[in-house]
Amino acid sequence: MKKNLLFYAAFLMTSVTIFAQTFDSKLNSGNNQTIIPSHVPSQPLLPPLCGSYNVGTGQTYITLTAAISDLSSRGVSCPVSFILTDNTYPSETFPITIGIITGTSFTNTVTIKPGAGKTPVITGSSTTAILILNGCKYILIDGSNSGGTDKSLTWVNTNTTTNTYTIELMNAKSYFDVPE
């Protein structure tokens, strides 16, 4: 019985070693790279955003910065609207940057707009911009709080140094880039 247990233990160790070598040779091509899993099993993956989310004190997102951060990490699966429910947003971290958002399309847009009857002012000092749209597509900034043509949303950069902006538009690719 002792010989059988010893053989069984040696067999298990050999199996693990063989598996590790196969795993290394197939995924790392023998160059000893460290593989870092993209998802930690103890933390569930959150689904993409879909629908309307209020942004303000006591709402789904307290700041627009938090809403955009969540949007950037989760993407979208249908149209998304961030409804600004406060008139001031003093706790934002500038610049607020919106990059490429997974899932956006002609029908799956992301809209930032004031809530009914609200006149939000997003103001602060940034050496670059308050809002940077960096290579993103299908982002709508709707300034009306009534669905009309009123101008109820204000963005202000109080920094007066040269080359500062309130809203900066950036293109992730140059027209001269070679297609992939």
Image: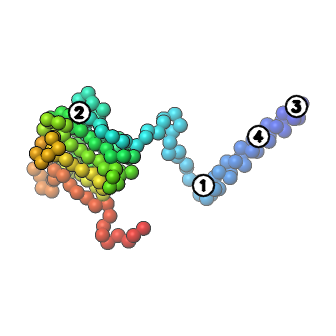
Instruction: Return the x and y of residue 74 as percentages of the image width and height.
Output: 39, 44
Instruction: Return the x and y of residue 46 as percentages of the image width and height.
Output: 43, 38
What distance separates the C-alpha of mark 3 from that of mark 1? 38 Å
Secondary element type, mark 4: helix
What distance separates the C-alpha of mark 3 from that of mark 2? 69 Å
Amino acid on which the number 4 mark rests in the picture = Leu
Amino acid on which the number 2 mark rests in the picture = Gly
Quarter of the figure that contains the C terminus: bottom left
Secondary element type, mark 3: helix
Secondary element type, mark 2: loop
Amino acid on which the number 3 mark rests in the picture = Lys
Q: Is residue 82 left or right of residue 90?
A: right
Mark before the other along the chain sequence, 3 or 1: 3
What distance separates the C-alpha of mark 1 from that of mark 4? 22 Å
Q: Which residue is mark 3?
A: 2
* Residue 9 visible within the image: yes
